[in-house]
Amino acid sequence: MVTLSEILSPQCVFLDVPGTSKKKVLQNISQILGECSASFSANDVFDHLIARERLGSTGFGNGVAIPHCRLAHCEKMTGAFFKLENPVDFDSIDKKPVDLIFVLLVPEKQTTLHLEVLSKIAEKFSENDFLESLRDDVTSDFLFQKITG
């Protein structure tokens, strides 16, 4: 089983990400991810994340969203964590705005592993004490340690 420390690097933890809507946040996240990787473009990431959102919101409650998609040019499963500057409506199941986002980008053929890792992320991000610690005034290094620890 893949651990979060295998898919999330310290360079992929971002604080105070701007955006006033789900679409704008996903555009900003895609731009950041496109700049971080030579494997995929910002447009490719955005198009796939938006296509996935059209199937149903990835906002699963308690201010958390886990946008995810499979990409043809993705060489290895990649995670990224974003703490938003301000919470945004994400069409979440509980109708609460989202301020914590874990993005998962997966190679196209890793269907089973994709679902296993999504389950692991969802489990971790459903713990209230864990979420509160992420919302404190913290550094990206602290967030990386907390998420992967």
Image: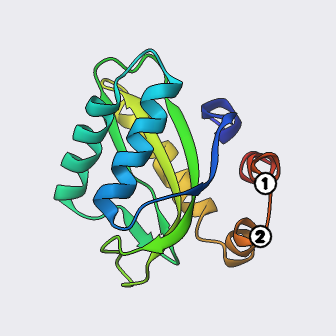
Q: Quadrant of residue 7?
A: top right
Q: Look at the picture and state if 141 lies above or below 25.
A: above
68 versus 62 height, above or below? above
| Figure disc tally | 2
Mark 1 Cα shell of 10 Å, populated few (<14), some (14-19), many (≥20): few
Choose between 80 and 43: the one closer to the eye.
43
How dense is the environment of label 2, judged by Cα within 10 Å: few (below 14), some, or many (20 and up)? few
Residue 146, which numbered label?
1
Q: Is residue 128 left or right of residue 73?
A: right
Residue 33: x %, y % from top left: 47, 34
* Residue at the disc numbered 2: 133
| Quarter of the figure with residue 42 | top left
Q: What amino acid type is highlighted by mark number 2?
A: Ser
Mark 2 in CB contact with mark 1 (< 8 angstroms) = yes
Q: Give the residue drawn at x 33%, y 66%.
A: 21
Q: Identity of the amino acid at label 1?
A: Lys
Q: Position of residue 76 (x, y in %)?
A: 49, 21
Camera-side residue of 131 and 120: 131
**Front position in the image: 78 or 121:** 78
* Helix, strand or loop at mark 1: helix
Q: Residue at x 48, y 27 (%)?
A: 35
Q: In the rendered structure, which disc, 2 or 1, sits on the residue that comes first in sequence?
A: 2
The answer for how far apart the CA atoms under marks 2 and 1 are is 8 Å
Residue 22, position as x, y percentages in the image: 33, 63
Say which residue appears at 58% left-offset and 62% top-offset: 123
